Every structure is written in structure tokens, then in C-alpha cells.
Image (tube, rainbow, N blue to C red):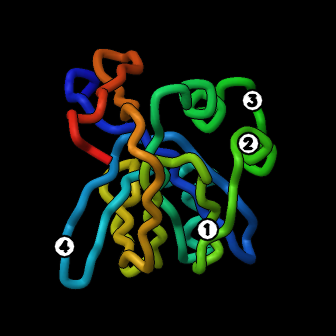
Amino acid sequence: MSRVAAAVHVITTGGPAGRGGATMTAVTSVSDAPPTVLICLNRSGRLATLLRANGVFSVNTLVEGDEHLAGVFAGVGGLDHEARFGVGEWTVAATGAPVLAGARMAIDCRVSEIGDVGSHAVIFGVVESVHLGPVHPALIYLDRAYRVVPPLDGDA
């Protein structure tokens, strides 16, 4: 899958079980009625446990310059889930999920269904709200490295 270009996201959750987040590319649109996305994450990780308990998550799409933030939420530096939120500027969405203030886009979701496939949980989220940030060059992951895709001329 390293040969498939994908947007880089930080998936976060917040609520009674606590906050957590991780960097991932496994995010996709499922439906527009109701608006639904899915994420895939390792069932054995702490984020999966927090997300199941909280029942909410946000998808924060990263931009050029967020490489350090992506590393922190990927576990580089060994910070625990709560300490990771010391990097970047975070607000809280209506669901209680943390939202990155400088994200290209943040999607606030409520979990509607979870299925287990192999080592991973496939988590469906109904979109509660979408927060659009400035149109900056998008951060993608390709060939095991971060790359940047500039906006098209005229995008705003």
C-alpha cells in the first residue's frame, strides 16, 4: 500500500474515556445520504479502545508543514495519547472530538457501526459537521515518504 498515494490525517477522539489520536491514511467516503466516512485502525491499539468507548471521532486532514505533527501522532517521540495534543492548536467539535485548528479539513463524526476485519476495526462514522480550513498544499504519503500536492490554480 506504500505505492498508493493517500492524504495524511490525524484521527482523534475525545469523551468520557479520554482523548487520543493517531496518524493514518485509511480514510474514505462511504455515502452522502447520510454523509458517512470510514476509518480503519488496529484493534489492539489504545486509540481503538478510546474510540469505541467515546463513540465519536474527527478526521483532521494535514497540510504542508504538518510533517512533525504527523510524526508525533504516529508515535515518534513516544508521547502518550494525551501529551500528543501539546503539539498543534486544538479545539473541540460538537461531538467532543478534538479538531486541529489548522487542518485543511476536519470532519466531526459519530460512530454508527464497527466491524472487525483481521487485525483492524473498520469504523463507520456519520458526519455531524465539517470544518473547512484554508486551502494550503495537501500533505500526502507515497513510497514511504511525505509529499506535498499544491492547490490547483484558482482554488480558494
The image quarter containing residue 148 is top left
In the image, residue 12 sits, relative to residue 108, either above or below, namely above
Q: Residues within 10 Å of mark 1 (few under 14, many from 20)?
A: many
Residue that extends furthest to the front in the rendered view of this protein = 154
Q: Are marks 2 and 4 in contact (CB under 8 Å)?
A: no
Q: Note whether 71 is above or below 23 in the view shown.
A: above
Q: Earlier in the sequence, mark 2 or mark 4?
A: 4
Image disc number at residue 84: 2
Residue 90 lies, in percent from the top left, at 69, 54
Distance from the alpha carbon under mark 2 to that under mark 4: 31 Å
Say which label, 2 or 3, has the lower sequence index.
3
Residue drawn at (74%, 47%) of the image: 85
* Mark 2 residue element: helix
The alpha-carbon separation of the residues under discs 3 and 1 comes to: 22 Å
The residue tagged 3 is 78
Amino acid type, label 3: Gly
Q: How many marks?
A: 4
Q: Secondary structure at mark 4?
A: strand
The residue wearing badge 4 is 31
Q: Which residue is mark 1?
A: 97
Q: CA distance from mark 2 to mark 3?
A: 9 Å
Q: Position of residue 40 (x, y in %)?
A: 37, 53
- CA–CA distance in space, label 1 to label 2: 14 Å
List x then y, in percent, for residue 153.
21, 34
Q: Nearer the viewer, mark 3 or mark 1?
A: 1
Horizontally, is 144 left or right of 155 in the view? right
